[in-house]
Image (cartoon, rainbow, N blue to C red):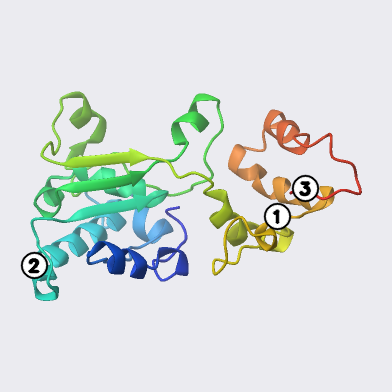
Amino acid sequence: GFFSGSPSLDLYNGMALAAKKNTIVVNINYRLGPFGFLYLGDDSPVPGNMALLDQQLALRWIHENIASFGGDPTRVTLFGESAGSASTTAHIFAPGSYQYFNKIIASVEADSVSSDIGLPLALAFGPVSADKNFFRGDLFERLRTRNFKKDVSIIIGTVNDEGTYWLPYYMYLHGFRFNHTISAEDPQNKALITREQYRQSMQAFMPYFGNSPLVKHALLHAYESVSEGQSIA
């Protein structure tokens, strides 16, 4: 999200991508939480979207220096998932970013679905949709008037079985494990948890769904056919 994370995690190691696809992978950091997204007004010392400006500065550095590493500044692809997906697409609407990239790969989330069914996202700080420094106007007005970068190729999609890789980060204490050195189908990588462990893990997710009783009931009773003594694979 926009409140935690780091490109130094093994999950984001671009070594394999660089080795197999003859690409140069650059992971960038940006400020998180209130340091990156607090908004106190356009003319205040805290104008919001500082994190997106951090990213924009990193893109400028890449544009100016990537040739020294054997790269081509005219062939830069932005790739992101989760908050990274929102960030990469945000640069399409930021005039200061236009010259620094020409392709985007965005792994999308279910934000629109959450909004449609009335489940608020548990993010205290995120991008401001109208500002003077990054979007230089109202994002939605830019979208309505088609005032955005158009000479860009975009791939938008989702990842199958994404939970296999993410659950161990969030649910390690509840029995979810994953050894990335062996096959995902290996029995050692199956989440063999008891009903109580499942209940605890789903309870931990409830704040992300606004503690909705409807969602809680659906999650806690998803495996009603499993007996108390069985494990859930």
Which residue is identified by label 3? 232
Element assignment for label 2 = helix
Identity of the amino acid at label 2? Glu
3D distance between C-alphas at marks 1 and 2 = 46 Å
The local crowd at label 1, few if under 14, some if 14 to 19, many if 20 or more residues have their Cα within 10 Å, is some
Which residue is identified by label 2? 64
Mark 3 in CB contact with mark 1 (< 8 angstroms): yes
- Label 3 vs label 2, nearer the camera: 3
The location of residue 105, given as percent across then percent down, is: 29, 47
Q: Nearer the viewer, residue 97 or 33?
A: 97
The local crowd at label 2, few if under 14, some if 14 to 19, many if 20 or more residues have their Cα within 10 Å, is few
Considering only order in the chain, which callout, 2 or 1, is on the residue closer to the N terminus? 2
Q: Is residue 150 left or right of residue 223?
A: left
Q: Is residue 30 left or right of residue 23?
A: right
3D distance between C-alphas at marks 3 and 1 = 7 Å
Q: Is residue 131 left or right of residue 5?
A: left
- Label 1 vs label 2, nearer the camera: 1
Considering only order in the chain, which callout, 1 or 3, is on the residue closer to the N terminus? 1
Quarter holding residue 35: bottom left
Which residue is identified by label 1? 191
Q: Nearer the viewer, residue 173 or 177?
A: 177
Residue extending farthest to the bottom is: 68
